[in-house]
Amino acid sequence: MDIATPAGMLAGMFLLIMAIVIGGGVSGVMAFINVPSMLIVVGGTLAATLVRYPLGRVFGLMGIAMKTIFFKLSTPRVEVQRMVEFAKVARKEGLLALENKVADVKDIFLAKSIQLLVDGTDAEGLRSILERDIENVRQRHSIGKGILESMGTVAPAFGMMGTLIGLVLMLRDLEDPSSIGVGMATALITTFYGVLLANLVCLPMGGKLALRSKEETLLKELMLEGIVSIQSGDNPNIVEEKLTIYLSPAQRKRSTSEDSGEK
Amino acid sequence: MDIATPAGMLAGMFLLIMAIVIGGGVSGVMAFINVPSMLIVVGGTLAATLVRYPLGRVFGLMGIAMKTIFFKLSTPRVEVQRMVEFAKVARKEGLLALENKVADVKDIFLAKSIQLLVDGTDAEGLRSILERDIENVRQRHSIGKGILESMGTVAPAFGMMGTLIGLVLMLRDLEDPSSIGVGMATALITTFYGVLLANLVCLPMGGKLALRSKEETLLKELMLEGIVSIQSGDNPNIVEEKLTIYLSPAQRKRSTSEDSGEK
Amino acid sequence: MDIATPAGMLAGMFLLIMAIVIGGGVSGVMAFINVPSMLIVVGGTLAATLVRYPLGRVFGLMGIAMKTIFFKLSTPRVEVQRMVEFAKVARKEGLLALENKVADVKDIFLAKSIQLLVDGTDAEGLRSILERDIENVRQRHSIGKGILESMGTVAPAFGMMGTLIGLVLMLRDLEDPSSIGVGMATALITTFYGVLLANLVCLPMGGKLALRSKEETLLKELMLEGIVSIQSGDNPNIVEEKLTIYLSPAQRKRSTSEDSGEK
Amino acid sequence: MDIATPAGMLAGMFLLIMAIVIGGGVSGVMAFINVPSMLIVVGGTLAATLVRYPLGRVFGLMGIAMKTIFFKLSTPRVEVQRMVEFAKVARKEGLLALENKVADVKDIFLAKSIQLLVDGTDAEGLRSILERDIENVRQRHSIGKGILESMGTVAPAFGMMGTLIGLVLMLRDLEDPSSIGVGMATALITTFYGVLLANLVCLPMGGKLALRSKEETLLKELMLEGIVSIQSGDNPNIVEEKLTIYLSPAQRKRSTSEDSGEK
Amino acid sequence: MDIATPAGMLAGMFLLIMAIVIGGGVSGVMAFINVPSMLIVVGGTLAATLVRYPLGRVFGLMGIAMKTIFFKLSTPRVEVQRMVEFAKVARKEGLLALENKVADVKDIFLAKSIQLLVDGTDAEGLRSILERDIENVRQRHSIGKGILESMGTVAPAFGMMGTLIGLVLMLRDLEDPSSIGVGMATALITTFYGVLLANLVCLPMGGKLALRSKEETLLKELMLEGIVSIQSGDNPNIVEEKLTIYLSPAQRKRSTSEDSGEK
C-alpha cells in the first residue's frame, strides 16, 4: 500500500485537531462535530456528483480510483527484470512454458498478456487487444479524476450553502444575544467542512489519480512491448535493451551497477 | 429514464431541507421561500442567457438538453447485437427485407440509416449524410452545454446582486433594530438560491450533457459503421467483429461468455 | 434587428427594479441611483479598457460589435436560394447580367463579390481577396470580443474599489451612528453596479459576439463558394448541391419539402 | 507617443479622486494617502516579482515593456511606402545607394536590415539573421507580459495582506472605540491599492504589451519581406504587391484611392 | 548563487514587518507570531501535498527545485567558449585528450557527455543517451513546478480553515467582550500566513523553476550539439558557428566585439 496518501490525510486531520485543542481545549473539538453540517457537505457533494455522473459509474469508478490511489505500483525496473526472465524461459523451454508462470502473476493485465501469447495470438492481434485495454484503463482513470475534481469544486459551494442556511436561521431570531455566537459558530463549521473536504481529500486525490494513471499505463506499455518482443523470439538481452527506454537514467544506472555487482 | 440526474437533484434538495428543519424547525423552511429572490436569480439568469444566445435556440436547445440528460441511452452491446441481427436478415432475405424492421426501430437516426440503405444510397452518400447528422447532434449538444455552463456562472452573480439589493434597502433604515436580522436573512437567501442553482442544477447538468453527448455520438458511429458494413454485404460475423472496437473490454467479455452460454 | 439581446437586458433590468420595488417601495429605487458610483464603474471600466486597447479601435470596434450583436443576420437557406437565383441569371444572360443585381444587394461583402465577378477577376484572385476579407472580419470580431470580456473582468474590480472608497470615507467618521447605514448602503451600490455591468451586459455580449462571428463568417464562406461556383459556369443545380453542406439537416429538410410543395 | 495608455490611466485616477472628493471632500483624499499601505502593495509586488524573475531582467524588461507600450508604432502602410521607395532607389542607383538612407532610418531593425543588404549578405543569411531578431523581440515581449501579469495577480494578494495586518493590529486594542473606524479605514486602503494597481495598471498594460508585440513583429516581418524582395531585384510594383498582404483591406483601399489621387 | 530569489523573499518579509512596526510598534510584531497558525498553514499544506505526490518524491524533488532555483546557471556564451576550446584540444591532441578536462568540469551533464565521447560512443548513441537525460531533467522540473503550484493553491485554503477554527472557538464564548478582538486577530493571522506563503514563496518559486528549467535545458542542448559537433571532427570555427543559434543577438554581438578585441 502506498503510505503517502492516507498518511498525508491523517497528518492534515491531526494538525487541525491539534490546533483546535490548543485554541479551545478538548471540549473545543466537540464544537467542530456537527451532523447536519456533515450531511449538507458530504451528502450535497455526492448528490451533485450523481446529477453529473451515471449512478453505477460513480461507485464503480470511485472504487477503481481508490484502488489506483492506495495500491502500491510495481516499478519499471522490477517489470523489466520480469520480462527478461520470461524471455529466458521462452528461449530455453518455448513460449508454452510461460503458461506455468501465469499463476504467479498477480497483475491481471500481465496474466492476460501471457495467456494471449501462449494461445498463439499473432503480434498484431496481441498489440491491438492490449492497447485497447490500456486505453480503457486510461479512460476510466480520467473519468475517476473528473469525478474527484468536480467533487472538489462542489464541496466548498455546499459548505457555503450550509453557512447561509445557518446564518439565515440565526438572523431570524436575534432576541437572545447569547445564542448569536453559537449560531454563527455552527454556521461557519459547514464552510470549514467544505474547504477541508475539497483541499485535503478531493482535489489532491484527483491529482494523485492522474499521476498514478500515467505511471500505471507506462508500466502496462512496458509489459506490452516486452510480450511482443518475446513473441518475436528476441533473445533476453535484446528484450532488456528494448525496454530500457522505459527506465529513468537513475533507474538504469542502479540496474547496471547491480548487474555488475552480481557478476 | 436515467434515474441518477433527477435522483441526485432530489437528494440534494432533501438534504438541504432536512438541515433547515433540524436547525430551525418546519417554520424555518418558510424562511427560505422568498419570491422576489427567486425572481432575481432564476429570471436574471434566464435574462442574461437571452442576451448571450438567440431566443428560439435557448428554449429549443434546453429541450434537447433535457431529453439528452434524462433519456436513458441504449448500450453499445445491445446495438451491436441489433446490427448483427440486421446483417443476418440482409444475408438471408436481401437488403430490402430490412424495410420491415424500420417500424420497430424507435431511434430516429437508426431508422433513417436503414431507410437510406433500403433506398439504395451508395456507401459514400450514406456515410456523408449520416456523418453530417452526427456532427450536427454534437454541435447542438455543445451549444446546450455552453448555455448550461453560462447559466451556472451567471446564477451566483445574480444571487449576489439580490443580496446587495436586500442589504442596501435594509441599511437605509436602521431605526428599528429588530428588523435588521430579518432584512439580512432575506438578503442572504438570494445568494443561497444562486449558489444552489449553479451547483446542484446548471453546472452538473452541463457536465452530464457533455458525457451523454460522447456516449450518444459513439452509439451513432457504431450504427453508421454497422449499416455501411451490412451494405457492403459483410457476413454477420464480420459485422460483429468490426463493431467490437466500440465495446469496452468488460462489455466484450460479458458478450463472449453469454455467447458461449447460449451454445 | 435581433430581439433577444436587448430584450434580455431589459428583462434583467426590469426584474431587478421589480425586486427593489417589492422590497423597498418606489422610493427604494432612488436609493440605487448614485452618480459617483456610476462614474467609478462605467468610467473606470472604460479607462482600464483604454489602457489596454488603442483609442480609435475601442470606439470603432465597439461600433462593429454592436452592429454584429444587434443586427439580424440572414440565414444560410436564404443565401443558398439567392446564389441559385444568381446562377440561373448567369446561365441565361451571362455573368455581366449580374451587375444589375448589385444594386439590390445590401450585404457589402456580397456586393463586392459580385462586382469582382463581373469585373472578370479570375477564380484564384477572387478567392484570395474574399478569404482575406473574411479573415479580417473574424479578427475584428475577435478583438471586439476581447474588449467586451476584459470590460467584464474589470467592471466588478472597479465596483469593489468604489465600495472600498465608500467604506473608508464612512469609517473615518463614525460619530453619527445614523449615517452609518446610509454610508454603507451607498458603498455597496458600486459593487452592485460592477456585478450588474459585467454579468448582464459585458460578458454575455462578448459571448454573443463570438456566436455571431461564427454565423457571419459561415454565411460569407457560403457566398464565396457560391460566387466561385457561378464563375466556373456550374449550372444552378450543382451550385445548390455544393452549398448544401452549409445547411443543417433541419434547414435542408425544410428546404426540400418546400421545393416539393412548390411543384 | 501612444496617448491611449497614459490617458486611460490618468482618466481612471481622476475618476476615482473625483468620486472621493464628491463623497468626502478634499480632506477625504488625504485619507487615501497611506505610505505603509503603498510600501506593502508596491514593494511586496516587486519583491514577489524578484522571487520569480531574475534581477537584471525585471528592470531591463520593464524598460522594454514601457517603450513598447508607450512608443507609437509606425503603420504597415507607411512602411510599405518606404519599402517601395527603397526599391525605386535600388532600381535606379543600385543596392549600395541605399547606404545613404540608413542615416534617416530611426528604426534600429530596419537600419540593420539595410546595412546587411548593403554589405552583400545573401538572401538566406539575411532571412535567418532577421528572423532570429524578430523571434528574440517576441520572446522579450512575452516575458515582459508575463512579468506584468504576475504583478497583476500578486498585487491584490499583497493588498489583502496589508488589510489583514491593519485589522489584526486594530483588533488587539479595541478599548478606544473611536479609533476602530480609523483603523479599519486604514486597513481597507491597502486592499484598495492592490485592486487599483492590478486592474488599472498591471493587467491592462500586460494586455497592451501583447497587442503591441503582435503589431511590432508584423511590421518587422513586412520589412524583412521587403528587404528580401529588394535584394532579389524585384521592381517597385512587385515589391508593393508582395507587401500588400500585410495591409488590412481598409488600409489597402485608402492606399489605392490616394494613389489614384496622386495621379 | 542567484541573488534575486532569496533577496526578493527577504525584501518582501522586511516590508511586511516594517509595515507592522509602523502600525503597531515592535510589540505589534509579536501579535503576528502564532505557532498553531503556522502549524495549520505550513503543516496542512505539506499534508495535502503528500496526499497528492508520492512521499519520497516530494522531498527529493523539493531539493532539486531548490537547487534549480537558487543555483546560478552558467551562460550560453561561456559554454560556447568552452565547447570551442574543447574543439581546439580535440583538433590538436585528439578526442582522448579531452579526458584530462573532465576533472575540471563541475557540470555533471557535461562531464558525462565528455566521458561518453572519450569512450568512443557513436553519434547516434551519444545523442539518444543525452537527449533522454535532458528529457528526464525537464520532467523532474515539471513535477517540481507542479508541487510548488499545488502548494500555492492549497496554502490559502488552509489559512482560511485556520481562520474558521479561530472564529468558531471565539464565537462559542462571547461573554468576555474584551477577548473578542484578540480572538479575531488570532483567527485572521492564519489567513495572513496562507496568503503570504502562497504569494511570496510557493507561486513565484514555481514560476522561477519553470523559467530556470527552460534555461537549463537550453544549456544542455547547446552542450549536446557541441559534443556531437566535436565528435564529428568539425573544426573550432564551425563548432562556434553551429552553437551561435543558442545565443541571443545581444550575446552574439558582445561575443563578436570581444573576439575582435582579442586580436
Image: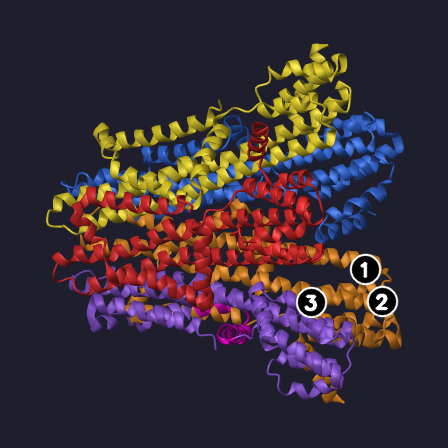
Chain colours: A red, B purple, C orange, D blue, E yellow
Indicate the secondary structure of the residue bearing disc 3: helix
- Residue E109 is situated, as x and y percent measured from the top left of the image, at 60, 26
Give, as a three-letter code, the residue at label 2: Gln
Is residue B31 rendered magenta in the image? no
- Residue D105 is situated, as x and y percent measured from the top left of the image, at 72, 30
Indicate the secondary structure of the residue bearing disc 1: helix
> Is B67 located above or below residue A194 in the figure?
below
Within 10 Å of disc 2 (Cα), the crowding (few <14, some 14-19, many 20+) is: many
Q: Mark 2 — residue?
A: C231
Residue E127 in the figure: left or right of residue D202:
right
Residue C126, label in figure: 1
Give, as a three-letter code, the residue at label 1: Leu
Q: Earlier in the sequence, mark 1 or mark 2?
A: 1
The quadrant where residue C225 appears:
bottom right
Indicate the secondary structure of the residue bearing disc 2: helix
Label 1 resides on the chain identified as C
Asked whether the residues under the numbered discs 1 and 2 touch, taking CB atoms below 8 Å apart as contact, a structural biologist would say: yes
Residue C219, label in figure: 3
> Is E149 located above or below residue A187 in the figure?
above
Whole-angstrom CA distance, mark 2 to mark 3, is 18 Å
Start and end of the magenta stretch? B45-72
Residue at 38% over, 27% down: E10
Residue A207 in the figure: left or right of residue C191:
right
The quadrant where residue B195 appears:
bottom left
